[in-house]
Image: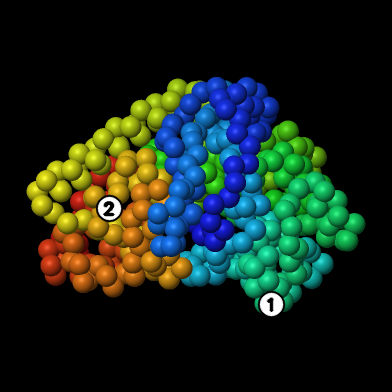
Amino acid sequence: MNVQTTTFPVPHQAHGHDHKCRLCGSQVETTMVDLGMSPLCESFVPPEQADAMEPFFPLHAYVCGECFLVQLNEYVAPEAIFEEYAYFSSYSTSWVAHAEDYCRMIRDRLDLGPQSKVVELASNDGYLLQHFLPMGVPVLGVEPAKNVAQVAIAKGIPTRVDFFGVELAEALLKEGHAADVIAGNNVLAQVPDLNDFVAGIERLLKPEGVVTLEFPHVLRLIEFNQFDTIYHEHFSYFSLITIDIMAKRHGLKVIDVEELSTHGGSLRVYLAKQDSSREVLPAVAELIARERAAGLDTLQAYTIFGEQVKRTKRALLSFLIEAKEAGKSICGYGAPGKGNTLLNYCGIGPDFLDFTVDRNPYKHGRLTPGMRIPILPVEELDRAKPDLVLILPWNLEREIVQQMRHIADWGGKFVVPIPEVRVIDPREIKL
Ligand SMILES: [Zn+2]
């Protein structure tokens, strides 16, 4: 999701096969899925570096047998990934609308006003906090990427450029920023020191304050075979079972949970201090029971997933090989991070895809990391008229099929790779 402008960061720390769980400290030995060696999925290769080497790191997801945190070893310093983003949340209109809905909901639910304080961690360009300004609710953003934070500051949103943890929480407390609400959307997966981050949250929270965290749900990842959402920049993948363990370790409790459709299926969890008067709603026990029924408190559910991923790779390759043997031309649509996990793991290069297209001009003229597939503007599809268009951001399938249905004019069809390979003929779709 985040486009990285620094080219090739240096390896951070390699643990080998011996490592401790990022959350509970147990020895982690069980492989969930091994996606082989892969480059950083947001390191799009500029044309002048087309002949240069590119670092590859193991893309190997393990699962902890104690707390069931799915985790990757950390190979690249977060500073290298996050100091300069080319990703601005406000570019996505649906994401901004999602944020606005959240702000209204949380204001009403917690009765926020001029006496309150909302702190957002990884506040990006202020896409969320901006909605509190007209409501008169004081806010503070925390954002490590300076260029993105400056956009928020220019909008009038107080923003601290820093990484969040206990140290920063203490400093913010001294400056009077104790929080009624702490929000963290899609940040938890990218936190290398999870315990320091959550301990910081607990420190900064007022006694009756509420924390909301949103993150992709590992149950959906397994159920819908979303293995391509695993990449180096995402160190951790959570079930509610794991979140519950994490909360208890830090004097917090899960009081509510909602399932969202964002990012292929996310959770929004609500946390409060263990000794706060806030009640635990039935949704929490209900979802934990569903996760147990799916086996997420056993290692088996995770290791079965690894086998399913290998079958998916073989099925997708069989389909593409058959199409090429039949003389068909294939192009990609989109160059998202998840696409690069899929392409590298399956070994799908320019011998299968002539090129891919993307709406983000930053990517035009660059090559996908590892597989080195050229990325062109969307209009190039109309010129090339390929027989098949492989949709890489499958979470946007509906939107892309609607926007690009005119490929039917030359007999083109869409291919969706996940959860399993599927062909969509736009002529058969009713408006
Ligand atoms: Zn653990």
Q: Is residue 134 left or right of residue 174?
A: left
Name which residue lies at 62% across and 26% down.
Answer: 19
Taking depth in this image into account, of 411 and 93 the one nearest to the observer is 411
**Could you tell me which quadrant the C terminus lies in?**
bottom left
Closer-to-camera residue (370/401): 370
Q: CA distance from mark 1 to mark 2?
A: 42 Å
Q: Is residue 317 left or right of residue 98?
A: left
Quadrant position of residue 375: bottom left
Q: Position of residue 202 (x, y in %)?
A: 77, 45
Above or below, comparing residue 149 to residue 32 in the picture:
below
Please tell me whether mark 1 sits on a helix, a strand or a loop. helix
Amino acid type, callout 2: Pro
In the depicted structure, whether residue 381 falls above or below residue 270: below
**Label 1: which residue?**
154
What's under tag 1, amino acid-wise?
Ala
Q: Which residue is mark 2?
A: 350
Compared with 333, 283 (above or below) is above
For the residues labelled 1 and 2, say whether their Cβ atoms are less than 8 Å apart. Answer: no
Tell me where residue 27 sits by quadrant: top right
Q: Left or right: 394 with respect to 271?
A: left
